[in-house]
Amino acid sequence: MEQGIFVSYRRQDSQSAAGRLTDRLKDLLPEVSIFRDVETIEPGVDFVEAIERALRSCGVLIAVIGPRWVAAAHDDGSRRLDDPNDYTRLEIATALKRGDVRVIPVLVEGAQMPGTAELPDDLAALARRNAIELSDKRWDFDVSTLVETLRKALGLPEAAPDRPSAPAPAPKGPPRRAWWIGGGIALLAVLGILGEDNGGMAPAPEMSYAPPVQTPARAPVAPSAMTAAPAGRVDLTGLWRDPDGGMHEIVQHGSDLVFRGRTPDGFVTGTGTVSGHQGQTTYMFNGYPLRSTFVVAADGQRMDVTIIDPATNERDATQLFRVR
């Protein structure tokens, strides 16, 4: 597969976000050629020919979609998307026709994924592509999630760690650390999972994480503590941090929880339920099934978590602290 990345965007809609994203991708993927029209096309070169040539050498097209992407209009008021010669339409339609190009919609500035009815026929397949959102509040984190997806799509090796470490022997089971906590976890396409159509997100990538902070060993949470939860429902939606430096974003819908993420030891994805101030989860850690139970503090700012290996009944304990 070719190694290039084509960044498609509308200047009327998301020029600033596309430029910011391109600069960050160049920093994080220096080995990859990145095409962005305003920087790459030389003066006097036919724009359409340059686009076609660039697309022939790319393995991924990123369609940057802002809140004005669908409704952007010519001076006469007609929609640009309805113009067969619209550059953005040409870029994406050409990429969609090629079976060897991954087209990834990237939503910025709070944009929603357009539906099939809003798109011309040659872009209808775009509405069925899983999208990823880049939020200003968590820009670096969301971009790192996108980069992991790009590395997989282009067959690139994982990024080298910032500091060397001695190789650890292969574990027989899951590593003995905070299995449930995600170090650098992105928000799931939870609305899609719970039945709302928001365009979804890209398949779960392995995400980057902050180097763990050394902390003293924690004593396991006693089972009796699970019965001491105060009454009343809490909302766990938000960003949480664990003592090892990981961050976790949970989305709660009623009593249901959905989460995914990556610890320093691997990828985690699962679901759970909460009742009052206590709950439970089931999930996969690098393909290994685990469970957990947790108790939320009365002020809703801390969770005491017990991790359970159902195969051996071994247990570990950790805590989560609300960030926002």
Image (tube, helix red, strand yellow):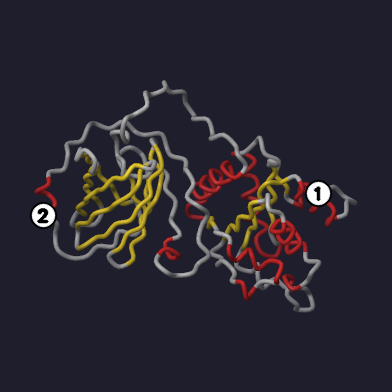
State the residue position of label 2: 228
Residue 187 on image: x %, y %: 43, 55
Residue 285 on image: x %, y %: 36, 43
Residue at (22%, 51%) from the top-left corner? Answer: 294
Q: Secondary structure at mark 1?
A: helix
Q: Looking at the image, is 235 positioned above or below residue 290?
A: below
Q: Kindly check if marks 1 and 2 are in contact, taking CB atoms under 8 A apart as contact.
A: no
Task: Rate crowding at label 1 as few (under 14), some (14 to 19) or many (20 or more) other CA atoms within 10 Å.
Answer: few
Circle 1: residue type: Arg
Residue at far front of view: 311
Residue at (76%, 52%) from the top-left corner? Answer: 37
Camera-side residue of 72 and 129 = 129
Q: Looking at the image, is 92 positioned above or below residue 27?
A: below
Circle 2: residue type: Ala
Name the mark nearer the viewer: 1 or 2: 1
| The quadrant where residue 82 appears | bottom right
- Per the rendering, the mark at residue 170 is none
Residue at (48%, 55%) from the top-left corner? Answer: 137
Q: Is residue 320 left or right of residue 131?
A: left
State the residue position of label 1: 53
Residue 269 on image: x %, y %: 38, 50
Residue at (75%, 78%) from the top-left corner? Answer: 77
| The quadrant where residue 47 appears | bottom right
Q: CA distance from mark 1 to mark 2?
A: 65 Å
Q: Quadrant of the C terminus?
A: bottom left
Camera-side residue of 37 and 179 = 179
Residue 266 on image: x %, y %: 40, 39
